[in-house]
Image (cartoon, rainbow, N blue to C red):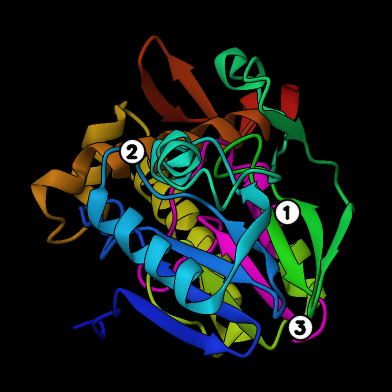
Amino acid sequence: MAAVIPAVTKISPRVIRILGCNPGIMTLQGTNTYIVGTGKRRILIDTGDEGVPQYLNHLRSVLNYEGIDLAHIFITHWHHDHIGGLNDILVELKEKTRYCQIWKYPSCKDDINKNEMIEPLKDGQEFAVEGATLQVFHTPGHTDDHVVLHLVEDNVIFSGDCILGEGTAVFEDLFDYMNSLKSIANLNPTTILPGHGNVIQNPSEKISFYLAHRAERESQIIQTLNSNRSKSFNEEDLVRIIYVNLPENLVKSAQSNVNHHLVKLLREQRVKKLDDRWQACDFNEVKSR
């Protein structure tokens, strides 16, 4: 069983974690938000979900107790449990956000881009407040706009939903996601602070596990298709075969992951699609291409 995450935790002299108080199947114990810096004006990473008074109360208490105003709010990606609480914070804590800049990497989601309050982040951009320097790294895959933030002073990565404290992450584009994992590995962080789940003290092992896990899933899909060449399968068929003892409420997410693997394999000409079903390519088909 995962260790219980307190509502408020001082991770280090530079980082305070505030739990979003929005537990669920996909959010685990809730969305982790982080206050970063040591001075009066600090940075908030992610804003939790909308309509969660308990989270706002915890955030307000920390800001008041520490005497903090927010200089910047960074959104790691467009999912509602990371950006949904933004308007609540700006309305309910306006005395703490009066001179705050809000930042997010541009997304293909037009409704997000049209929000005039939000300024566009750029890959490699750097921000500094007292006691903390954050570098922005665009890490697409989970979503097209996903970023991680590197706390230079402590060599810590705020990983959003690219890497979780428990379990594995879902993604929109497997090819991009795998490259993003490798990019984070190249930063060689000492610690990862995820968007969900507890602190990751063994980043290298965790990232290696994620990469190996995706390679294993791909191998299982190929093996299933190759062992049944006369048959075709949809995503649910493959989930039922490959994912052992999967809770029913996670089947849809697993189907989405399998689909992303199949799309990647299709691009690599290792599978073929017949309407809404999938089949292994035979040797002659691959050779003729």
Residue 104 % position (x, y): 68, 39
Location of residue 102 (image quadrant): top right
Figure check: 208 above or below 252: below
Q: CA distance from mark 1 to mark 3?
A: 20 Å
Image quarter of the C terminus: top right
Q: Which residue is mark 1?
A: 179
* Residue at image coords 63%, 24%: 285
Looking at the rendered structure, the kind of residue marked 2 is Glu
- Compare marks 1 and 3 and give the one earlier in the sequence: 3
Figure check: 125 above or below 98: below
Q: CA distance from mark 2 to mark 3?
A: 31 Å
Q: Is residue 154 left or right of residue 83?
A: right
Residue 231 seen in the figure = no
Residue 36 in the magenta stretch? The answer is no
- Seen from the viewer's position, the closer of residues 61 and 44 is 61
Element marked by disc 2: loop
The numbered dot on residue 236 is none
Looking at the rendered structure, the kind of residue marked 1 is Asn
**Pointer 1 with pointer 2, Cβ within 8 A:** no
Element marked by disc 3: loop
Residue numbers of the magenta segment: 152-181
Q: Closer to us: mark 1 or mark 3?
A: 3
Residue 114 seen in the figure = yes
- Compare marks 1 and 2 and give the one earlier in the sequence: 2
- Seen from the viewer's position, the closer of residues 42 and 29 is 42
Location of residue 234 (image quadrant): top left
- Seen from the viewer's position, the closer of residues 45 and 101 is 101
Looking at the rendered structure, the kind of residue marked 3 is Asn
Q: Which residue is mark 2?
A: 50
The numbered dot on residue 155 is 3
- Compare marks 2 and 3 and give the one earlier in the sequence: 2
- Seen from the viewer's position, the closer of residues 288 and 66 is 66
